[in-house]
Image: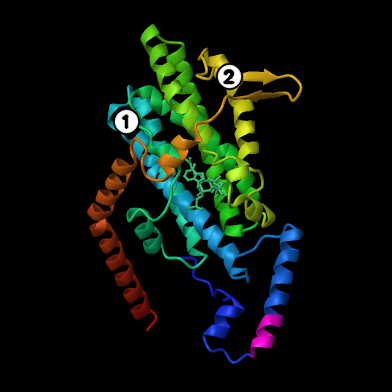
Amino acid sequence: MYTQAIDTDPQFVATQGAMRSVGATHASHDRLLASFDQRIANDEKIEAQDWMPAAYRKTLLRQISQHAHSEVVGMLPEGNWITRAPSLRRKAILLAKVQDEGGHGLYLYSAAETLGSSRAEMLDALLEGRAKYSSIFNYPTLTWADVGCIGWLVDGAAIMNQVPLCRCSYGPYARAMIRICKEESFHQRQGFELMLALCQGSEGQKQMAQEAFNRWWWPVLMMFGPPDADSVHSTQTMQWGIKRISNDDLRQQFLDATVPQAQLLGLSIPDSDLRYDDSSGHWQCGPIQWEEFWRVVQGDGPCNRERLNTRRIAHEEGAWVREAAQAYALKQAGQQAQALG
Ligand code: FAQ
C-alpha cells in the first residue's frame, strides 16, 4: 500500500550483477553509511525510500511486525468478554477498544510493509509460529476484572513503552505510534475506571479485582522485555534511535507510576519485597521470575496454543473476505482504466 522504490543495499546490487566495480561499490556503500549515521546523529527521520543499512531494515521489520502481531493477538483476551460485558455501556466501550487494537495492528503492518515485507509474509510467520508477539497476551481473562487489569496495566505498560517510540528514527513507525498512543491513553483510563468501580463495589467485586490484579502484576512487569543485561537488541537499536529508553528504565517508570495507583484503588501488591527506596526516590520490586517469561516467549504459556489456534481459524474463515476485497479492487481498477480510455 505504501509502494515506493526502495534503494537496495549496494552489496545486494553488486551480487545481482550490477555494472559497478566492487571497489566503487564499497566506496559508495561507505558514503551512504556515513550519511545515514550522520542523519541518525542529527535526529532526522529515515523514510521508506531512503537508503538504510540492511541490519537497520531487518531489526525494524522484526520489531514492527512483532508489535503488529501483538496488537492483533491482543484483541483475543478482551474479545473473550464482549458478549459477557456487564452493561451496555461497558460493552460499547469494550467493542470500541478491541476494534482500536485491530486498527493499531493494521497501521503497524502498513508501516512494516514500507520496509519491503508483504502483509501475507508477516501473517504466515505469525500463524506458522515463527514470529513473536507480546508474552502478556498468553495469559487468560478469567473474570470481568481481568478486562479492567488489561486496560489499566497492559495498556498502561504499552503507553510507557510506546510514547518514546513516537520519536523513533524511522518515520512511518514513529507516525503510526503517535496515533496509537492517543488511543492507548483512553484505553488505560477506561481500565482504571473499571477497576475503580469494582474496588468501590461489593466485597465480592473487590475480591475479584484483587485476584485479577494478582494474576496480571508480574506478567505486566515482564512485558517490558528481559533485563538490560540480557537484552540482545537494545544496544544497537538505541544507537539507531529506534528504542529510546531501555527495558529496565521503562519497567522502573511503570512501577513508579503504578504503585500509587494500586494504593489509591486499595489493592495490595502481590510482592512482599516491594519497597520505596528513599535514596533513589524509586519503588523497588522483588525478583522477577524470568524463567516464566522465557517459557511463555518460547510458546509454553497458559494460552499460547489457544491464541495461535484462534488466529489460524480466524484467518481461514476470513479468506472469503480477502478474496471479495481483492475481486472488488480489481473490478474498480478495471472500471477506472476503461473510463480513462
Ligand atoms: N514478549 O533484546 P530484547 C500492546 C523478545 S502492544 C515476547 O530486549 P527488543 C497494546 C524479543 O523480541 C505490546 N517477546 O528485544 C495492547 C527478542 O527476541 P527476538 C507489544 C519478547 O526488541 C494493549 C528477545 O526477547 N509492544 O500491548 C518480549 O530490543 C492491550 C530479546 O529481547 C511492542 O511490541 C515480550 N514481552 O525489546 C493491545 C512495542 N520482550 O526478536 C491489546 C514495540 C522481549 O530476537 C490490548 N517493541 N521479547 O526473537 C519493543 O519496544 C521491543 O521490541 C520490546 C523488546 C521492548 C518488546
What is the residue that sits farthest to the top in this orientation? 203
Q: In the image, is residue 237 part of the stretch drawn in magenta?
A: no
> 100 left or right of 46?
left
Indicate the quadrant where residue 141 lies.
top left
Q: Name the spot of residue 67 as percent of width and height, x first.
A: 48, 49
What is the residue that sits farthest to the front in this orientation? 291
Q: In the depicted view, which residue is nearer to us: 57 or 271?
A: 271
Circle on res. 288:
none
Circle on res. 81:
1
- Disc 1 CB within 8 Å of nearest ligand 1 atom: no
Q: Name the spot of residue 8 as percent of width and height, x first.
A: 57, 76
Q: Main secondary structure of the magenta part?
A: helix
Measured Cα–Cα span from mark 2 to mark 1: 33 Å
Relative to residue 65, is residue 208 depicted above or below?
above
The secondary structure type at the circle numbered 1 is loop
Q: In the image, is residue 22 part of the stretch drawn in magenta?
A: yes
Q: Could you tell me which quadrant the N terminus lies in?
A: bottom left
Give the residues in magenta: 21-27
Identify residue for label 2: 273
The answer to whether residue 213 is seen in the rendering is: yes
Residue at horizontal 33 percent and vertical 54 percent from the top: 127
Q: Name the spot of residue 271 as percent of width and height, x first.
A: 53, 20
Residue at horizontal 58 percent and vertical 51 percent from the top: 232
Sequence-first tag of 2 and 1: 1
